[in-house]
Image (cartoon, rainbow, N blue to C red):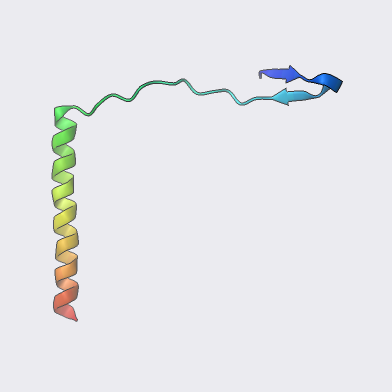
């Protein structure tokens, strides 16, 4: 474990830093999946609101 020694003999432990990488842009398949899920979520929320409105 990496550590440093300060004046007076105190030790400071540091956490291991994670490897840094750049995110990749979504592929065409992932974009299509996001659009389909967005439409499904919108339909679900709209359906729930309409059912709540009709029940009340």
- Residue under the image location 14 percent in, 42 percent down: 35
Up-down: is 20 above or below 53? Answer: above
- Residue under the image location 16 percent in, 75 percent down: 53
Position of 12 with respect to 18 (left or right) is right
Position of 39 with respect to 10 (left or right) is left
Residue 50 x/y as whole percent: 14, 70
Residue 48 x/y as whole percent: 19, 66
Q: Which residue lies furthest to the bottom in this view?
A: 56
- Residue under the image location 18 percent in, 68 percent down: 49
Q: How many marks?
A: 0
- Residue under the image location 13 percent in, 49 percent down: 39
Q: Residue furthest front?
A: 7
Up-down: is 3 above or below 52? Answer: above
Figure quadrant of the N terminus: top right
> On the image, which quarter does residue 13 sit in?
top right
Figure quadrant of the C terminus: bottom left
> On the image, which quarter does residue 43 sit in?
bottom left
Up-down: is 44 above or below 13? Answer: below
Residue 42 x/y as whole percent: 16, 55
């Amino acid at each position: 474990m990496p550590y440093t020694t300060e004046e007076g003999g105190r030790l400071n432990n540091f956490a291991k830093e994670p490897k840094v990488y750049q995110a990749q842009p979504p592929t065409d398949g992932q974009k299509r999946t996001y659009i389909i899920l967005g439409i499904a979520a919108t339909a679900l929320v709209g359906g729930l609101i309409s059912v709540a409105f009709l029940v009340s």
